[in-house]
Image (cartoon, grey):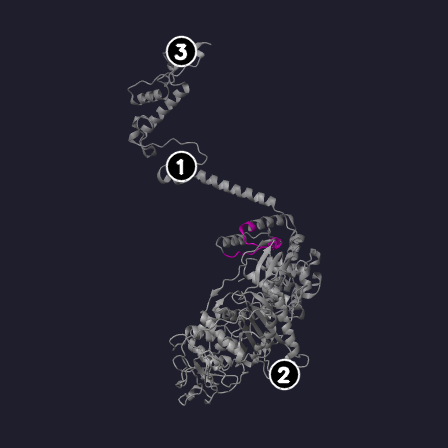
Amino acid sequence: MSEHRRKPPQPQGGGRAAARRGQAGSSSGRRAAPRGATGSPSDSYESGSYGSGGEERAYGGRAEARRAAQRGTGSRRRAADPGRGGRRAAPGGPNGPGRGRGRSAPPSSKRLIDYPRAGKYGAARWVPSWRLVAGLFIGFFGSLVAVAGIGYAMVGIPKEDAAAKSENNVYYWKDGTQMVATGSGQNRQNITIEKIPKAMRYAVISAENKTFYEDSGIDPMGIARALANMARGGDTQGGSTITQQFVKNTYLSQEQTLSRKFKELFISIKVGGELTKDEILQGYLNTSYYGRGAYGIQAAAQTYYGKDAVKLTPSECAFLAALLKGPTYYDPAGNENLDKAATPQANRERSEERWSWILNEMRKDGRLTEAQYQEAIKEYPKPQGLKATKGMTGQVSYLVDTAKRYVLNHSDISQTEFDQGGYQIYTTFEKNKVEALAKAVKKIEKERLDPENRELDKHVQFGAASVKPNDGAIVALYGGAGYENNHFTNNADTSGVPVGSTWKPFVLAAAMEHGTYNSNGPLSPMSKYNGNDKLKVRNQDGSYVLDKDDNVFLQRNESPRPWGYITLRKAMEQSINTPFVQLGWDVGMSKVRDVAQASGILKDSFATLNPSFALGTSTPSAIRMADAYATFAASGKHAAPYSVLEVKKDGQLVSGFTKPKVSQVMPENVANNVTDVLENVIENGTAQNAKALGRTAAGKTGTTDENKSAWFVGYTQQLSTAVAMFRENPKDHRLLSMNGTAGKDSIHGGDIPTELWTEYMKVALKGKSDPGFPEAEEIGEIHDAVGAPSPTPSFTPEPTESASPSPSASPSETEVSPSPTPSESCTFGWQCNTNGGADTAGTDGGVTSSPTPTETETDNTGGNANGNGGIFGGPSG
């Protein structure tokens, strides 16, 4: 090989260092450019030997020479342009000897994403270039397209048949045995579009999605609105199209999540592209829920009108289309078991309004002629009444409704999702106690009522509930005659039935806990108050309470008997009204309300805070009254009533069903003193029929104004039970007087309700011990009401009470002149019975609400006597 073709080796002093030296010399002008830097062929090599005398390349070859030349040129260019980049380059270039006199940009490196930006300093390094922004946007958009494409490819089109395969919900007794399996699976049948009347199709389109035949099947603004609400933690909402509703109906899961929303979106797009509009509409009408357990238009037609869907009239179609707005609130039969706002009257008004609106929309959209519209609007197509479904008979129907309502109020499960089934609900209900309560009602009805021969015995109803103290579990309830007898209201959880004198223990409890405006602290139940009829109730400033006509309000007792000033214990025993009205006014009705609410009474069942509030014008349910008295039984400890122990779906526990917390809501000794006083009511007062129970018990009777309802609420340490009796007009559900019922002038709480309570409690407590109640310790100070006579000094070792009014008693305190009252003597200390020769059977004083007093309490959050008193408090959701 010839020497001129062999690659010469690098000299020791060559390479980049030599290039830099040459570059520096060139820029200074004092040194000639090294060979190889001029580009001349004659200067390509230097003299010297390589190995055995071969030539060596001065700067590592031509490429290195060119780079050196370029560096030198760049250096000269920067020196000639001192403004370039805001800095003047140092002589010799970035790596030359002048580097320390100024900064130059670092050489840029090749990165996939140039951020922070090379060659930039300060804030400029952190401002992305337009290339970076554009690239990221294109990448993000491309990713979305890819994800959408994958999602679109993976989802399938829903089938009506799959949605129809709903399961039953199974309910279990407390012991784990099955109570009933119920659901909508068998009340569903798909039909083809040809069998769905055009009027039904048009009614839905005009009401819900006018552009159905033109739109793409999705509502982008509605979806964006729902996603935005979810991001803020609010409820999802948005005007979904019929296509989207059809897709949603086919899901067994109704959770409001982003993943489900996106999946729904992809399926809706796919459905809109692959199914015809008629197929989509058919699917929607076959999978929608119309209430009363009816899924699909065919089941709805049979449930509401007893006919096939194909035979529905335009008017009936508009009615059924209105139900899709929400059957709980648009079924004229009402659904108060789920929501107290869903009364038959309110639902009828809502239904009729939407029915007429839909018909008018159909006319405006050209889907009904004027003649067809006039025919359809002529008369509201009232549907047939409710019917019992398989297994939902006797008390089971009310137990299921109570448990279902509890589930919906204590979980995120929607009613639609729940009705699609597959849940196992384990309840607190004890079968033997439920049967014993129903049997007790039937026995009393058979022995005491004769509706076939006595008109006033018709429409008499009972409601009852039994709750475990210190726990809250509802072990039994009686809701009525059963769905099979067209009784669809749960009387154990009903509203609008005033509780009467069973409210008085809350007044006494408030006095023993808070005292009165003129006492030095808690009040003793041995304090004396005026028990005479027609009492003028005093305000705290000494003036009299006025009625709505600005006349002095007179509180009445049931009888004009002049009791004079008697102890609160005695007044409770004989259920005398006037002492408790004045006591409540002295304590403050707001405090009475607070004590009742802490004990378990729901605030939406409270009546107006006027003097009669002390006498039970409020309307809590039997469940809530049993639970509140359970607070007394548990020495002031309260737990909210509950009916469900646990819920499972697909073998997995559903969250939200832990037992309610037990908390001390009332001083222990206050509760024990209330119990002591209520024991005396059974032993010597208006509830002596309960002595037949044969064990230690406490309770209170109650009878309301015009004898429209009668109550007894009683308890032992193991069980608290409330019983209500009333008459109701079946047409408008208004209460009727029970005067003359059962062949008696009037019905009192100490009569039939107490007998029923005793009959049930004998069975429910059979085999149980009789632990009695904790001993009550003396509480509060004896502080008599204004006008009470001064006590007569006594020289006996035991305290002696005198209820006889002294001549100094103010005659203006009552319209009836005081007369001697039975002596109240006590030989066994302050807790002894104070019968004193009174009528030991007693009467239940009752509520007098007319004339109505003015509302002078400033802290007034009451409702009215027809307020809601349900266990769960009514509308969330």
* Residue 749, quarter of the rendered image: bottom right
Q: CA distance from mark 2 to mark 1?
A: 99 Å
Q: Which residues are magenta?
A: 234-260
Number of labels in the image equals 3
x and y, in percent, of residue 465 in the image = 58, 70
Task: Give the camera-side residue of 150 and 568.
Answer: 568
Q: Nearer the viewer, residue 40 or 7?
A: 7
List the residue tagged with mark 2: 743
Q: Is residue 815 above or below residue 629?
A: below
Of circles 3 and 2, which is in front?
Answer: 2
Which quadrant of the figure contains the C terminus? bottom right
Question: Would you say residue 240 sits in the magenta stretch?
Answer: yes
Amino acid type assigned to the residue bearing label 1 in the image:
Arg
Quadrant housing residue 164: bottom right
Residue 117: mark in rendering: 1
Look at the numbered disc 3 and give the secondary structure of its residue.
loop
In the figure, is residue 418 to the left or right of 673? right
Per the model, the C-alpha gap separating discs 3 and 2 is 140 Å
Q: Is residue 713 visible?
A: yes
Looking at the image, which is closer to me, 855 or 634?
634
Mark 1 neighbour class, 10 Å CA radius: few under 14, some 14 to 19, many 20 or more: some
Q: Is residue 86 above or below residue 161?
A: above
- The residue lying toward the viewer, choosing from 745 and 681, is 681
Q: What amino acid type should be assigned to the residue bearing mark 2? A: Gly
The answer to whether marks 1 and 3 mark residues whose Cβ atoms lie closer than 8 Å is no
For mark 1, give the secondary structure: loop
The residue singled out by tag 3 in the image is 51
| Of the two numbered discs 2 and 1 in the rendering, the one whose residue sits closer to the viewer | 2
